[in-house]
Amino acid sequence: MKSGVMVSVAIATYNRAAMVRQAIEAALAQTHPPDEIVVADDRSTDSTWAVLKELATGEPNVRIFQRERNSGGVENWNFAIGQTRGDYIAWCSDDDRFAPAHLKASIEYLEAHPEVGLVHAGFVDVIEAEGAVETMPRPLRFTRTRIVTKRTLLGYLTRYYDWPFHPSTLVFRRVVWERVGPFNPAYALADTDWFVRAVEQFPTAMLAHHGVYNRRHSGNWSNRLGSAQMQREIFEIVEGAIDRLYPRKTPRARRGKCHGE
């Protein structure tokens, strides 16, 4: 990895004191530690803010922010990334944690392939139920790095619409965030919408390794959203991509626009 390259990890959190501690500790324990970890607390009502203050006191690279009001989620995601300063930005959900070599592998690939704007990877499910914890690595989708581009995006989404990527494995160049724009709060699946818009503009690599531990528990965002709404949003996101890639004279009705569209 080149010297002087700054790597930021962004974490948005709400009422997950124990989980966010583990997410931060896993980021700090990377084989190539990040230059900063930015954590935005969405005005938690539990002990999350106290945990963040404790961690930031002992770790100067942990930068914490507390919102004045609870935003409901997506706005806080944008806020967290907006506070980062790195050339590369790695996203991590507050209930996930990085595998030890995640950042090193991701940044080394991006440094070696300047034409690629962002990377993602496979993941390991960590299932928590009734006090038991079970670790289940998901089979890797590809045996070697696979590139998705604007030209191949729709075929990729058609085949893997159920989970085109895992958000906590995303590592991207700052220019990607600046050009694509922030997450669109009109979607609960704002990260999926952002991923699709990003691939429309930048070649994207799926690395053939497990990048994160994906905690499955009753409080998962997807559980709160519900499968029916998730399917509606995924189909709408794909339709939006079709409209942008293959414009029609009378476009479909769409949700609120976001910068970069």
Image: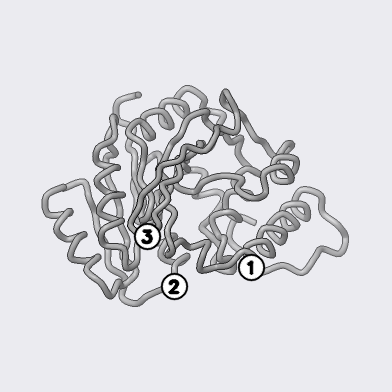
Q: Which residue is mark 3?
A: 130
In the rendered view, tell whether residue 95 sits above or below residue 26.
below
> In which quadrant is the N terminus drawn?
top left
Residue at x 64%, y 69% (from the top left corner)? 256
Residue 133's tag is: none
Residue 72's tag is: 2
Foreground disc of the pair 1, 2: 1
- Label 3–label 2 contact, CB within 8 A: no
Q: Secondary structure at mark 2?
A: loop
Q: Which residue is mark 1?
A: 229
Residue at x 32%, y 61% (from the top left corner)? 40
Nearer to me, 126 or 162: 126
Looking at the picture, which amino acid does disc 2 mark?
A: Gly
Q: Secondary structure at mark 3?
A: loop
Alpha-carbon span between mark 1 and mark 2: 17 Å
Nearer to me, 216 or 257: 216
Q: Earlier in the sequence, mark 3 or mark 2?
A: 2
Alpha-carbon span between mark 3 and mark 2: 28 Å
Question: Label 1: how many residues lie within 10 Å, few (<14), some (14-19) or many (20+)?
Answer: few
Looking at the picture, which amino acid does disc 3 mark?
A: Glu
Task: Please indicate whether residue 72 sits to the left or right of residue 13 in the image.
Answer: right
Q: Earlier in the sequence, mark 1 or mark 3?
A: 3
Nearer to me, 85 or 163: 163
